[in-house]
Image: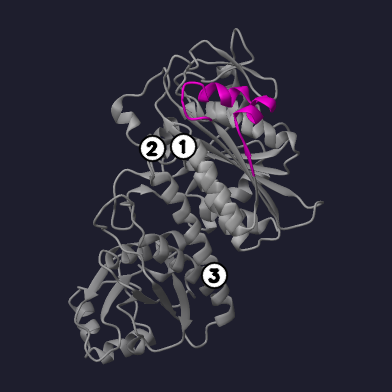
Amino acid sequence: MAVQLITQDYTAVTADWLIVGVFGEEPFSAAVSDLDEALGGQLARMRESEDLTGKLAETVALYDAPNIAPHRVLMLGLGKSDELDLATLNKAVMTAARQVSTKETPTVAIGLPGTENSGFSPADQWEAAVTALIVGCVGQGIYQNEPQRFSFDNITVVIAPQDDEEAIGAALQRGEAIADAINITRDLVNQPAQDIYPESFAAEAEELAAEYGMTCEIFDEDRLRQEKMESLLGVARGSERAPRMVILEHRGAGDDSPTLYLCGKGVTFDSGGLSLKPSAGMLDMKMDMAGAATVLGAMTAIARLKLPLNVVAMMGLVENMVSGLSYKLGDVLTARNGTTIEVHNTDAEGRLVLADVLSYAADHNADYIIDLATLTGACMVALGQDVVGAFSNDQTWCDAVVTAARDRGELVWQLPTYDLYADLLKSEVADVKNIGGKWGGAITAAKFLEKFVGDCKWVHLDIAGPAFAEKSQPHQEGGATGVMVRTLVEVAGRLT
C-alpha cells in the first residue's frame, strides 16, 4: 500500500473516494467551504437540513459529485473539536474506512480539519488517521471465496499549505508501520488452530525477523527442558503439537543501554485441558495466543522504525489439549525459578506458560518487562470487553505504560495488587496454587505472575476483553483487534 502526502484543494484530488472530516456545531473550514462551493452549496444545504450534523463517526456519502476530481465524497463527522482525542479520531476514521472498503476502492484520499482545539499535534492526527485507514480496510474473512472487504492500494493525505510537511511525512511512515504491525497481529489471531500452532507461529516469527532485521532464536522441546521450563511443558503435555518459545531481539542501542522485554502468552488453542471448556467457551479460543501475536506485531514496527532501544520479545507457545498425557488437577509443576505449583485448574494455563517466560526474562536482568495475555475472564467481568487491565510491582513504570496507552487512544485501567491477594494462592502441598478461588481472579492471576519477575520493573496487561471482538460494529471489524500494539511501540519510543 502506498501512502502519499499532497497540498491541494479537495476539488482537485484524484481518488475513488475523498473522505472529508468536519466538526459538529462549527463553521466549515476554508477547504470544506471551497468544496461546498464547487458542489453548488450542497454541503451547506445538508447541514441546514441536519443531514450533515458533524456528530462523531457520522457518515454522509455523496455518490454523485459533479465538477470535482474525486469520484465520490464521504463526509465524516468528528464531533466537537475540543472533545476530539486520538481514540475518538480512530473511531471516526475506522468507520469511514470500513464504509468505503466494502467494494474495491484502489485510491482513497482524506482531508481533516486542524487540531488547534484538540490537544494533539497535526503529526499525531495524521499518524492516527493513516493507521485507522489501513487497519479499517482489512477484514477477518481471510478464508472467504468472495471477500467482504478490500484493502486500499493508495492513500492520499491532503494537508493544508501551512502544515509541516516533514513532520507529517514522518508521522505517515510511523502510522503505516504501526498499522501493518496491527494487521500482522490480527491476521495471526484470526487464523484457526489448524494453521497457527506453536511450530507454525514460530516459523512466521522467524520469517518476520529476517524481513525486519531482528535476531531470532527458537527453543524446541529439548531446549525448553534444558532451560527447566517445566511449567510451560506441563501445559503442552496433552497436545501432539510440540511447544516452542520464540525470542526476537532488536538491538537499537549499545550493550550498556537498558533493555525492554516484551513477553506474550501464546496458547494457540485452549480447550481448557482436563478442566474442559464447554463448546461455546471454546469457539473463539484460537485467540488465546493474542498476547504473543501482539508482541510479535509490535516488534515488527519497533524494528521497522529503527527505534534506538534494545528490545527483546519472548513468546511462549503451547496448545492446551486433552489426552492421556494431559497434566492433571493435583499435579505439581516446577517452574524455571524453582517455584513449585499445585494445579487446581488446567484452564488456568496461561499463567503457567508465562511463569517460565517471565522467569527467563528476570534471569537475563531485564530492565523493564511488559507481559501481555488473554489471561482471565475475571478481568472482563471487572472492566468489560473494551478496557485492558494493568497490574504492576512498580508504580512509576505502570504510570508510564498507562500514560502511553491513553496518549495513543487505547483504554487501560490499573487494578490493585495488594499482598493480601497473594494469600489466596497459598497451597498446602506446594509453594503456590495456580488459581486463587472465586474472588479477584484477574488480580490473583497477576499476583501469581509477580512471583516470577524477581526485582524487575514489571507490568502485566490482561487483554482478554479487547483483544477479540465478538462481532463487527460500524467502527470495528469483528475478530482480532490488535489492541496494545500502538501502546507497546509508544512505550518503546519513550524509553529511547
Q: Nearer the viewer, mark 1 or mark 3?
A: 1
Q: Picture quarter containing residue 213?
A: bottom right
Disc 3 designates what residue? 173
What residue is drawn where x is 60% and y is 7%? Answer: 429
Amino acid on which disc 1 is placed: Tyr
Q: Which mark is residue 16?
A: none
What residue is drawn where x is 38% and y is 71%? Answer: 153
Which quarter of the rendered picture does the C terminus lie within? Answer: bottom right
Amino acid on which disc 2 is placed: Gln
Q: Nearer the viewer, mark 3 or mark 2?
A: 2
Disc 1 designates what residue? 197
Q: Secondary structure at mark 3?
A: helix
Task: State which region is magenta.
Answer: 217-242
Q: Are marks 2 and 1 in contact (CB under 8 Å)?
A: yes
Residue 433 within the segment the image draws in magenta: no
Q: CA distance from mark 1 to mark 3?
A: 32 Å
Image location (x, y in percent) of residue 1: 44, 69
Question: Crowdedness of circle 2 by 10 Å Cα count: few (<14), some, many (20+)?
Answer: few
Nearest the eye: 254 or 46 = 254
Q: CA distance from mark 2 to mark 1?
A: 7 Å
Q: Which mark is residue 194?
A: 2
Q: Is residue 245 visible?
A: yes
